[in-house]
Image (cartoon, coloured by chain):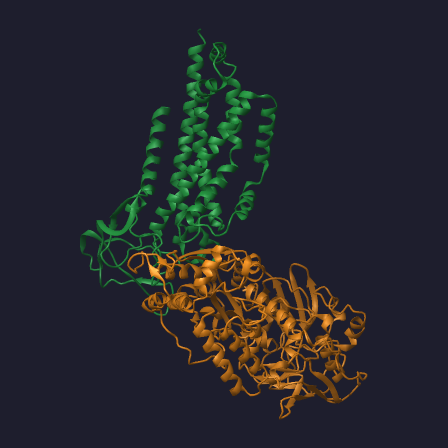
Chain colours: A green, B orange
Amino acid sequence: MTPPRRLTRWLVALVVLHCVVAGAGFFAPYDPVEQDRDHPYLPPMRVHLMDVQHHFHSRPFFYPLRLREGSFDQYQEDTAAAVPLHFFIRGADYPLLGFLPSRAHLFGTDGTRIYLLGSDAYGRDQLSRILFGGQVSLLAGLLGAGVTLSLGALIGLAAGYYGGWRDDLLMRTAELFLALPWLYLLFALRAFLPLTVSPLEAFLLVVVVIGMVGWARPARLVRGVVLSVKERDFVRAARGFGASDMYLLRRHILPETASVLLTQAAILVPQFVLAEMTLSFLGLGVPEPTASWGNLLASLQQYSVLVSYWWMYLPALAIVPFFLGYLGLASALQQRAGTYKIDEQSSWSPT
Amino acid sequence: MREERFFTRRCCITVGFFLACSSLLPLPISGFPHPQQTNRKEELLAMPGEIGRRGGRLVISLRSEPKTLNPLTATDSPSREVIGAMQADLVHINRATQLTEPALAKSWKISPDGLQYTLTLRQGLRFSDGHPLGADDVLFTFRVYLDESIHAPQRDLLIVAGKPPTVRQVDAETVIFQFAKPYGVEERLFDGWAILPRHLLEKPYQEGRLAQLWTPSTAPKEWAGLGPFRLKEYVAGQKLVLERNPYYWKTDANGNRLPYLDELVFLFVPSADAQVLRFQSGETDIITRLGAENFSALSRGQRGYTMADAGPGLEYNFLFFNLNDLGDKSSADLTRKQKWFREVRFRQAVSAAVDRDAIVRLVYQGRGSALWGPVTPGNRRWANASIAHSPRSLERARTLLKEAGFSWSTAPNAESTLQDSDGKPVEFSILTSSSNADRTKMATLLQEDLKQLGMRVQVVPLEFRSLLDRVTQTKEYDACLLGLASFDADPNTDLNVWLSSGGTHLWNPSQSHPSTTWEAEIDRLMEQQLATAGYDQRKKLYDRVQEILAENQPMIFLASPDILVGAKNSIANFHPAVLEPYVLWNVEQLFFRNGGENASR
């Protein structure tokens, strides 16, 4: 498979995954914070086509789960009444993509709630929470990567282009940042910040905190590219014609760093998603009841949840396709950058 | 769990401070005769219960290392638990019946005016090192407990009307305690005062190093007690091993000397989950202080052990608002919010909106009870049965809020925002301790309950120390969710929670004057019951206290967890109680039905 086609495939896969998360309101049957206090720790329901009498139904249905007598969390299927599954149903209000008020849901039921991936300790739908949690975690990852890359690119450009003591200062700082135990730094940073914050503020804090930490590596990479580019003939020529520093950086040098930055972005986004999950897992991220993948996994800190309710692990699986997608994208980008280099060099060599 | 205990300890210390300020008198205790070397027959106490067999070692895990083995300075719960198995008191509260029974004192008499307690000691008893026990040991014990320079946390419990009792010896077996005023708790007050060996401790006491004595690393021969077990070995960071006290003064119904067990081993296992795993793998024989979720996880995989729900304990969890009068130091934001918090109908509305049944079901998996007052159903003698158990009612909550001048930005349904009379939205935060999953869960449920009234609530899990600091020192908080656990059923143990001058009067601690009339009335009632003799009279007074609390809701009581424990099937005489120590209170009677298997381990 040629590199551009591979790249396209990974890109398409990622776009689809992100669309599902962005349209969480549509794909999720319920509001992610709505509690169903009669159904805590409900296991994932089975969708049937065949009923207990072995009759086939064209419309998928499920049997509601009822608590076993005298038990807190042991359910059994009540096969007396099948509840049909409806598609494209009107349900709970939600803002599609954050601003379009909508009530359309991909699937749902008329009465009994359906829990395709089970429910958590408060009877909240795990599927809805995973989808909505993805919005928080992925957005934090994307924005964090954006902050990091902008910082890294700026610092790398300045260090590489101006050189001298500025280079030394910036690169030594970068090395210091690389050497820091960043997880503990995140704790410390978060601990200094105010306690009572709204979910939105907490989210922005998380983004800024993780964005500030990772700039050193991209800055070093960008600096390397700048160091080699600024000695190239076309840059020297432009300078010879009297181009200003700003013009050179913007017009000739920055575009050369694009492939490095893109590859870094593809590597950093999943890393930062993981960083957000770590913070939330440890209770330093977005507060309850807002869902994020780290929040969803936080309940696994308890031994009893770990051994009793396997569906609480599912949020951990949700990140796997995203990771694969981003890492595939990164390697495709790297490969493309490599071949381009070779192409360019081969086209230069005859002249 | 560690938290409430920390708190109780804190309350003790603070009560001590304010009750005892006026009692700087020298201690009028009479002279110390020399230990009489009597050869009189031992007066042993025969215990009912299943007749057991000797041998075996019982292993139990502790959440942390005991800080000390010195009953004079022990405040943390691991220390108290260990000391409980090593020491004995004059009169003991039976943890199962919650009533007193004879211990080192075989009988007692209270004078009709309620001022004089005459205790008759058991004769011929010996400490765990073989040294005989005499009345002088009792006098010495109370002299050091009452010595202010020792700072014994229990000291304040003996201070009545600002004065310590005088203790004097009548003859070799009779000791008289003389109080300045009648003391409502009567002979219960003698529970928990470990009688100390004068022959080992008098010299260090005179040298002023008594409080530093008896750490876990003390050499076993420098240590002696009257409890069923004595010190054998301590391995720092790992375990504390106790061995059978051959001089223990209890026997079973057949006259066999107790305890049955040869050894009692405390393993230091820092996390609750690790304790569960150790118990599950058979490394420990008994597990206590279980959370409901771990309890049901253990119940599911039962192999060779039995899980028991001992019923509602004495822990009560509650939400309270910041009612401190901060004057100029208060931020404008907090002053605005305190206007709502001080409004009794606001607090009543919050209480009416709380879904207590959901808390019991979701947080305690049904192994707990909903609370409308501080006295849990586990405290059978003191709970006021007439307190209304009003079910959740959002209508009532809305009516109360409307009466108090609150309104809704749109129609009063789940989506609208509650506003105060100035049109400001009602928003506040609830602090919880991040290490306590149960309370964080309760706060999340409360958040959802109050959302339905249009209140916007944020839950802030905080490390416990900084939470305490905010509540008791800086007072920068809106509301807080906490729990307290009394160590005895008697109302006096919670004295400094209810007295407005108390340090654990959480919503507005250490006031110089009660700031409201109902707080003044609680003060009066609590002080009155303290000096009233007779259960019925005191109960009437304490019932009224509970009514005032239910009416004014300074604390919105939520729920109380059951005491959940587990033990290997081979352990007999296992009768968990709801008072501390939940399972070791009858450790001298515990035995292994098939002792050999455990002894060899």
Residue B255: x, y in percent? 64, 86
| Tally of numbered tags | 0
Residue B594, position as x, y percentages in the image: 56, 73
Q: Is residue B95 visible?
A: no
Splitting the image into 4 quarters, where does residue B531 fall?
Answer: bottom right
Q: Is residue B201 left or right of residue B585?
A: right
Q: Is residue B563 above or below residue A168?
A: below
For residue B562, above or below residue A260: below
Q: Is residue A127 left or right of residue A110?
A: right
| Residue in the picture at 62% in, 79% down | B191
**Residue that protrudes farthest toward the top in the picture:** A351
- State which quarter of the image contains the C terminus of chain A: top left
Which percent across, then down, holds residue A59? 19, 51
User: B347 or A185, which is in the foreground?
Assistant: B347
Relative to B580, is B308 on the left or the right?
Answer: left
Rendered residue at 47%/43% (across/down): A206
Q: Is residue B96 at least partly visible in the picture?
A: yes
Q: Could you tell me which quadrant the N terminus of chain A lies in?
A: top left
Q: Nearer the viewer, residue A307 or B327?
A: B327
- Foreground: B406 or A123? B406
Question: What x and y, as percent, mark residue B515?
Answer: 53, 70
Q: Residue furthest bottom?
A: B112
- Quarter of the image for residue B240 reads bottom right
